Image: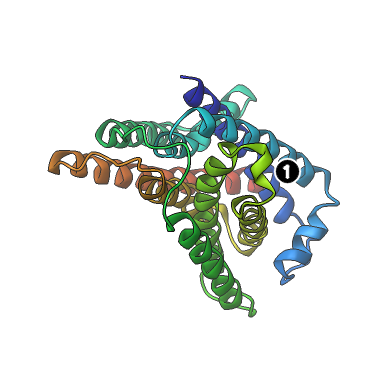
Amino acid sequence: MTSIIAALLAAAFFAVGSVLQHAAASAPGVPDGSTALRLTAHLAGRPRWLLGLLAGGVGLMLHALALHTGQVAVVQPLLATGLVIALLLAAVTGHPPGRGQWASAGGVVIGLGLFLASAQPAAGTARAHGPVLALASIGALLLCALVRLATARPGARHAALLLGVAAGTGFGVVGALLKQVVDTPPSHLALSWPPYALVLLGATSLTLAQAAYQAGDLVECLPALTVLEPLVAVAVGASAFSEALQSSPAARIGQVLGVVVVTGSVIRLVALQARADERAIILQ
């Protein structure tokens, strides 16, 4: 129960952080076409972006607590509830979502419930075994590098989507690395590679996420970020930490349906939110 509560709280802080950072990255005056590092350095001087970074930092600590007490295959999917929590916060602050948004949020919850009920992951191990975690880390870094090269030229098509895919994949592997790090004795951290891979891949994914926020609308990049992170983490965790998912035909069908429902609901939810934001700007 501790891991579930911590994961839900982490999702809330991550959601707040994403909204604040997107608002800062897409605001007037932000240099267009900057490199990811230069863009992040520029945004570091904006209070709204720093507040988003602080919210993300709190979310990261809660995320670490959730992974320390729970399984990757349970904790990571719960992070997708951040979009739902953002809607609840909007309702409380006087910006009530429409029925379509609530229906999409309900789809996210239903899809997550279906996936988790069908998956029923095994307890697994506290520490990763075999080369899976190392290979996943190298693969994610290579993907991030290739996507950044492909989207660096002006006018690159679907840059926000590609950057969101790379960042979401990177964050998914970061979740598995975080599980490894929090369960490593402090005296062994300096001599092991996961902490360094965590910092490198985490920083890389963060800078690509900022570039994705600037390259296009949230509707293009946020679904990839939101959906790929738990999917990649579950895939890596299932192998590296022996958190095997149920493999019966019925269970597999439930898992696939759950992922499909979550993915469709997230895309629909972000699209509706983008339209609502556009109407609000027109009315101002």
Seen in the picture, residue 148 relative to 111 is either above or below; the reply is below
- Estimate how packed mark 1 is, as few (under 14), some (14 to 19) or many (20 or more) residues with alpha carbons within 10 Å: many
Q: Residue furthest right?
A: 45
Q: Is residue 51 left or right of residue 90?
A: right
Is any part of residue 16 visible from this angle?
no
Near-viewer residue (149 or 18): 149
Q: Residue furthest left?
A: 249
Q: Please name the amino acid that badge 1 sits on.
A: Leu
Q: Is residue 126 left or right of residue 248?
A: right
Near-viewer residue (98 or 73): 73
Q: Is residue 43 left or right of residue 243?
A: right
Query: Disc count in the image?
Result: 1
Q: Residue furthest top?
A: 1
Q: Which residue is drawn at the image coordinates 46% and 39% (left, top)?
A: 76
Q: Which residue is drawn at the image coordinates 66% and 50% (left, top)?
A: 22
Q: Secondary structure at mark 1?
A: helix
Is any part of residue 222 visible from this angle?
yes
Residue at image mark 1: 53
Seen in the picture, residue 24 relative to 138 is either above or below; the reply is above
**Residue 177: x, y in percent?**
54, 48
**Residue 223: x, y in percent?**
47, 51
Location of residue 252 (image quadrant): top left
**Residue 132: x, y in percent?**
42, 56
Q: Which residue is drawn at the image coordinates 53% and 36% (left, top)?
A: 82
Q: How is the image coloured?
A: rainbow
Q: Is residue 58 left or right of residue 151?
A: right
Near-viewer residue (40 or 145): 145
**Residue 254: x, y in percent?**
22, 39
Location of residue 101 (image quadrant): top left
In the picture, the quarter occupied by the C terminus is top right
